[in-house]
Image (tube, rainbow, N blue to C red):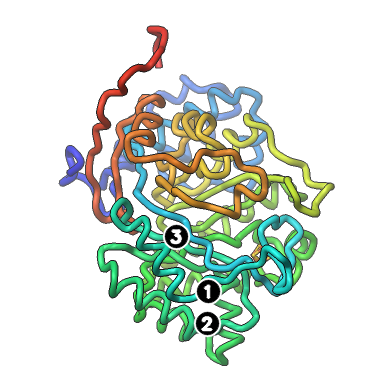
Amino acid sequence: MVAGVNAQNGAGEHADWPVRLHQRLADVERWSVPLQAIVRKLARNEPLTLEDGMVLFEHPNLPELGALANEVREARFDRQAFFNSNVHINQTNVCVLACRFCAFRRGPKASDAYALSVEAYVEDVGRYAHAVDEVHSVGGLHPEWDVTHYEAMFRETRQRYPSISIKALTAVEIKHLAQRSNLSTKSVLQRLKDAGLTSLPGGGAEILDDDIRAIICNGKESSAEYLRIHREAHEIGLPSNCTMLFGTVERLEQRLQHMISLRELQDETNGFQCFVPYPFLPDHTRLPEAQLSTGSEILRTIAVSRLMLNNLPHIKAYRMNIGDHLAELALQYGADDIDGTVQKESIMHLAGSTAPLDHNRSKLARLIQDANCVPVQRNTTYSRFENYVPPAPVSRRALPMAQ
Ligand code: SF4
């Protein structure tokens, strides 16, 4: 178990992190003048406003912003960085929608359209079951599947592999299943939970602004529906993550309002475990006007997320999207989690990701150590933790410099 686990709460963080943060930020003069008012608020664990967020986005000294986010991260977790052993299995790429940023979806007649039967899905899980404790599954909105298909999929998976958690389905998939099954979204969530669903991964939030959604993902659930479905999940005891797809056509104010909307729901339910901000990847998509994000913008957005979301414990550097090198740096800019071993993934890779898929625990742990962090393996719900020390690499050429 993690050293000092008794002093930590269920999310793996220090229960007294606000006190620790207050102490760490006591010397306000240490920070440059434009940040000092914000540092005072952070020290009191007061939520930042949209205007504060704009100051952070416009602050010219990115390393200083990263250092501030890192103070919050270390008050919560010290140098621990979390990962898990998981596999991504995308159950179908057939989708009735056609979001403009999506390189994954296919029409039902496309030559490379696929839809895994329950048996094929469970067999796929079985190929990785010896090495993972979580299967992460999201996919298209299949025109024929209703809730019974997913009930069978989850039930069969849990029966054959009871130690594997199922983190699956985005809010729009829940909405689609509700429509297909003539049920409320809450009933669908309850039935899937009863069949073995452990949590929701949080994808599909994109930017919670209906004008932006009309441009990039017309036909998807509205911002209010995304929030309502997550609220319902939390109400029935299904935790979830939440995401933000940035770098399409949104303004900075809309990114910040997105974070504030999630923070407000978290105030109500405390059901979000992790925030996953990731940039738009442009390959094969139909969004030529997208702004795209630079490496420094990605690090800045992760740092701002950490500072804005004072009630959300974990911030993920989603290495499947931003790649290993940037994920390593992000661990010093406020992120504390890098997702998992993954093994297999289609959605980000079709959009242009080159992040390696063959990571085992040792490789992930070394990536974390290279960021001067302590690797901690977690389960899906951030309720079980284990320090993981990777075996020493056979040969590794490195010059003797500071990390
Ligand atoms: S993002 Fe999801 S809902 Fe939108 S087209 Fe792709 S698979 Fe379908």
The amino acid on which the numbered mark 1 sits, given as a three-letter code, is Ile
Alpha carbons under labels 3 and 1: distance apart? 19 Å
The residue that label 1 is drawn on is 229
Secondary element at image label 3: strand
The tag earlier along the polypeptide, 2 or 1, is: 2
- Residue at 62%, 65% in the rendered image: 93
Can you give x and y, in whole percent of width and height, for residue 277 in the image? 56, 47
The residue that label 2 is drawn on is 185
Whether residue 309 can be seen here: yes
Is 181 positioned to the left or the right of 81 in the image? Answer: right
Label 1 beta carbon within 8 A of ligand 1: no
Label placed on residue 63: none
The residue that label 3 is drawn on is 136
* Pick the front one: 91 or 192: 91
Is 291 positioned to the left or the right of 264 in the image? Answer: right
Labels 2 & 1 near each other (Cβ < 8 A): yes
